[in-house]
Amino acid sequence: MKPQALIDVGNGPAVIFCHGALMDSSMFERQTQALSPRFRCISYDLRPITEAPYSLSELVDGCLNLADELEVERFVLAGLSMGGFLGMELAFRQDQRLVGLVLMDTMAADYTAEERTLFSSIFDPLDTDGQLPKSFIDQFVPVIFSQNAENEQPGLIEHWTRRWGSRSARSILNEHRAWMAKDDYRPRLEDIKVPTLILHGRDDRGIIFHHAEVLHQGISGSTLVGLERTGHAITEEAPDRVNQALSDFLGRLPAW
């Protein structure tokens, strides 16, 4: 079954975009618009907000199932944050359908014991009926957006905080439990053989830039692009620079 929210525009080689936690398919609207004259661009909501708990492996299965339903044989996967975890999990399967990989503001390392304790204290109270509380939303603005965005793009912040306010608390808890359970991918990065682009905001306060350098060092032949004065949600804060980097990378790939 196709997801409730699906962007499927353009013709040509396929690029599938996978969003990060707290976000949805709309975070790639500027990318799908810019690239659709040359590529078939697909962006979808990884899970409906009422979905029961799920794993990263199930998200990979869901991505492949969607590709089947859309009759997409081979594709580039572009994932941000949790979507990047999905992309690495897919690459580790060495699925022959994966042509290339774009990892945006994501990381290979697992979470430390201290981080797990901290996140549990923040997310466990979301095991309740109702919408996300404002206190939680306010706490995550600086995780998702840079200080520069807070100062200069207040409309962007307002758009997403309003969107988050419509989400159920438990749906965000389910996302958290999926990405918090990720493995330490660092020992397996050498197994990623497809061409890989790493895009990361240098002012990302959720996943610091160091993690992009770890990915770049571990994935042979990868390309690293750091975006100045940009936070975690790079597709929203710096769409033109992201679009240029994506266009350059996709244009270098052999036809698929």
Image: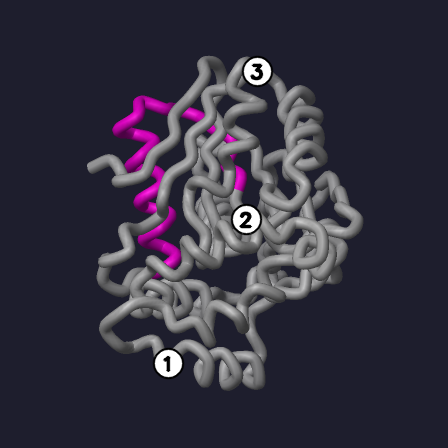
Q: In the image shown, does 42 or 109 lie closer to the viewer?
A: 42
For the question of whether residue 41 can be seen, the reply is yes
Magenta span: 55-78
Task: List the residue tagged with mark 1.
Answer: 124
Task: Indicate which disc residue 255 carries.
Answer: 3
Task: List the residue tagged with mark 2.
Answer: 80
**Tag count:** 3
Residue 37 in the figure: left or right of residue 96: right
Q: Residue at x 47, y 47 (%)?
A: 19
Numbered disc 3: secondary structure: loop
Q: Which amino acid does label 1 sit on?
A: Asp
Mark 1 → mark 2, Cα distance in angstroms? 24 Å
Residue density around tag 2, few if under 14, some if 14–19, many if 20 or more, within 10 Å = many
Q: Earlier in the sequence, mark 3 or mark 1?
A: 1
Mark 3 → mark 1, Cα distance in angstroms? 46 Å
Q: Which residue is drawn at 42% across and 47% down?
A: 24
Q: Nearer the viewer, mark 3 or mark 1?
A: 1
Mark 3 → mark 2, Cα distance in angstroms? 24 Å
